Amino acid sequence: MRLSGDAGQIYRQIIREIHSRVRLDGAKLPLKPKSSREEIERMREKLRAFTPHDIPANIKPLKVKKEYLNDRILFVREEDIDKVAKLNLCKIDAGEPGLRIGREFFELETDEKSNTALEVIVAPEIYVKAVYENLENLKALADLMLKAFGSSVVPEVLSEVEKIAPLMERARLAGRIEEIVAEEALRLNRRIEEKISELEVTIKGERILELMRGRVPEIEELESFIAEEVIESERKIEEITGINAEIFSRSYPVEVNTVAVDRIKAEIEEEAIIELYKACRPVAEKIFRLLPEINREVEKAYELEFLRAVKEFCSGFVFPEFSDCIAFVNGKHLFIPNPQPVSYAVGNSEIASGKIAILTGANSGGKTSLLELIAQMQIMAQMGLPVNAEMAWTDVVDELFFFKRKRGVQGAGAFESAVRAFTRALLGKGRKLVLIDEFEAITEPGAAVRIIAEFLRIAHEKDHYVVIVSHLGKELSEMLPFARVDGIEAKGLDENFNLIVDRQPKFGRIGRSTPELILEKLYRKAKGEEKDVLERVCRSVRD
Ligand SMILES: Nc1ncnc2c1ncn2[C@@H]1O[C@H](COP(=O)(O)OP(=O)(O)OP(=O)(O)O)[C@@H](O)[C@H]1O
């Protein structure tokens, strides 16, 4: 469905309202109004069949972060170097095809034999890591898919990846070893300091004699305490790394032997990286194949969340019946707080007939708002959504043209652009709903009658639906027998001299405009000479 003129703005208001209820960023889907009845029916079906699910907030697409791996060299035939250079995953060199990691060399199968993507062969770890770092999100996705659709590929991927979790941890360990040792050194020194401060309070005067004789049992005790604590700390690190080494000095303050730490790190790295690579190869091949499927599941989750928000927004609304009219009973404007419900129709309906309607009536009576309401109804109907009314009927159109009066915009420029827009709305084939707000406001009333009349004749010939707001209802209805004139009327003034308007248009009746009521209101409020002047004007209008 084409949205022309200001119709796009109405669509954006509606979609913004739905999006404000969506709790997942990725789920703010664009749902455009459609011109095909099948597509509209499909969306309706989705909404009817939908049962809401709690959508976990941590669902997001699985992204594989490409990273450059310094620990390997890919060898390819000289002539293939340029082709694979764009992979940018590791160093590439000419040679017998294969991948060198540390002391190991893995032969490469030739392209013809292998179906596996080269990046999966070179860096399978990055695929496994992408899953491993998103275990919680993926578990949430799997739960949701199983609940909502009874199937998911995620559990298969997770079970593969979880098998190599210990290897992943070990490979990570190499990167964290300095940190682990530094933290342990800190704790170790703290334990020793606690012990020393205890000693300070227990040293007694008589010990001084022993100290003078060169025998200090406290110091000896402290030295053996330090040795025990250091061994204890080294044992803890051995538990983590599986490697026994003299990492700490044996005296206070305990210092880290960086050479020993580097050696541990190198040992873990070499062995863990190779083990991990071997384990990741088959897993990555599977994930690589299933990644698009996982992300399709994420899309499905987004759709569930979007539909939930749509349902929330449309709660209490009704699906319009397909018909050869655009009509509703007790429709409510979406963005006016506590709106008075209004019924309206163009086309052949039980409410009123005629495809061309001229809407007349009281100032601030709600004419513009009624055009907005009709636009909202039609856009939502063609989005496949229910509408805010007790009953509604819709005819699918190809284009909605909405010309909104721009307050304060006057003159030749405004007139020219309005004529252009109106002309464009009448061009070409297709079913159209044309909504026009007070076209004459930007030209002279005399010329306006003739211009509008001709535009409406063309619209009538083309069998479009038209609602046009005009104060020229009387003149237009005389010229256009096919047009229906509706009126929104003021009922009177309230105790604060505000106009009481009935927002419900009277069909086939020109709405009495309200200058009399306004004059009366001003007259009743006025004092002195102003009151005299207004009294004369009021009388002249009545006469
Ligand atoms: N159905 C409704 N229920 C409650 N308030 C409404 C309704 N329709 C319109 N209003 C309110 O009435 C006021 C005037 O509405 P609107 O601008 O649509 O009138 P109008 O007839 O187009 O005015 P004008 O003659 O100045 O162009 C607005 O504040 C609007 O929110």
Image (tube, helix red, strand yellow):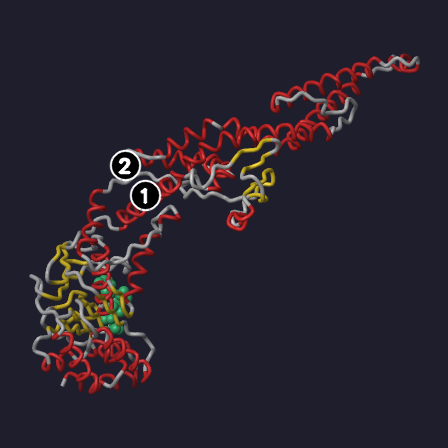
Q: Position of residue 124 (x, y in %)?
A: 49, 37
Which residue is depicted at the point 43% across and 34% down?
136
Q: Which amino acid does label 1 sit on?
A: Lys
Q: In this view, does 338 lie above or below 207?
A: below
Mark 2–mark 1 distance (CA, rounded to whole Å): 10 Å
- Ligand 1, seen in the image, is in the quarter at bottom left
Residue 427 visible in this rendered orientation of the protein = yes
- Quadrant placement of the N terminus: bottom left
- Quadrant placement of the C terminus: bottom left
Q: In this view, does 334 lie above or below 406?
A: above
The front one of 426 and 360 is: 426
Which residue is depicted at the point 48% across and 42% down?
119
Q: What element carries label 2?
A: helix
Q: Kindly identify which residue carries mark 1.
A: 300
The front one of 471 and 191 is: 191
Residue 365 visible in this rendered orientation of the protein = no
Q: Kindly identify which residue carries mark 2.
A: 149
